[in-house]
Image (tube, rainbow, N blue to C red):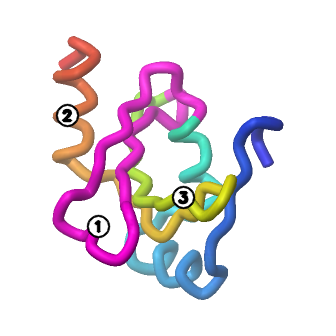
Amino acid sequence: MLKDELVFEWSESKNLINRIKHGVSFEEAQFAFLDSNRIILKDVNHSDAEKRFYCLGVVNDKSDVLTARFTYRDVKIRIFGADFWRRGKRLYGKENNIY
């Protein structure tokens, strides 16, 4: 857990698949939520059964913008995907007047 206010969970099998497919672990994805300039977007295309969201945030000192896909389960943030998504970086830059 990174902060007392944030509690994360995920499936270890999905975490392994994500690391193989995208080279990003869900442990690393947690840091996107700590970016003070992070952006939370609703995933309107995949929110039928449960509300799903994107968190766009910088995760390292190289200013890499990571997109974490997540949902809320009770008081926990359940991460189910993460990637360095080019569209996420563009949206992050536009919203924060960076790029």
Q: Is residue 90 left or right of residue 59?
A: left
Please tell me which residue is depicted at 29% across the width and 49% down the height of the picture. Answer: 42
Q: Are marks 2 and 1 in contact (CB under 8 Å)?
A: no
Question: Which mark sits nearer the N-terminus, 3 or 1?
Answer: 1
Q: Which residues are magenta?
A: 34-61
Image: 81 above or below 2: below
Classify 10 Å Cα crowding around label 2: few (below 14), some (14-19), many (20 and above): some
Q: Quadrant of the C terminus?
A: top left
User: What secondary structure is found at the residue carrying circle 2?
Assistant: helix
Labels 3 and 1 touching (C-beta < 8 A): no
Residue 26 x/y as whole percent:
58, 62
Q: Which residue is mark 1?
A: 47
Relative side of 39 to 85, left or right = right
Where is residue 20? Give x, y as percent. 47, 79
**Residue 39's x, y, as percent?**
36, 32
Q: CA distance from mark 2 to mark 3?
A: 22 Å
- Position of 99 relative to 60 (above/below): above
| Mark 1 burial class by Cα count in 10 Å: few <14, some 14-19, many 20+ | few
Q: Which class describes the residues within 10 Å of circle 3: few (<14), some (14-19), or many (20+)?
A: some
Q: CA distance from mark 2 to mark 1?
A: 20 Å
Relative to the observer, which residue lies in front, 66 or 95? Answer: 95
Residue at x-position 49% and y-position 62%: 24
Q: Amino acid at mark 1?
A: Ser
Q: Position of residue 80 (x, y in %)?
A: 48, 70
Question: Which numbered disc, 2 or 1, marks the residue closer to the eye?
Answer: 1
- Write down the residue under mark 3: 72
Q: Quarter-wise, where is residue 92 in the image?
A: top left
Q: Which mark is residue 91?
A: 2
Q: Earlier in the sequence, mark 2 or mark 1?
A: 1
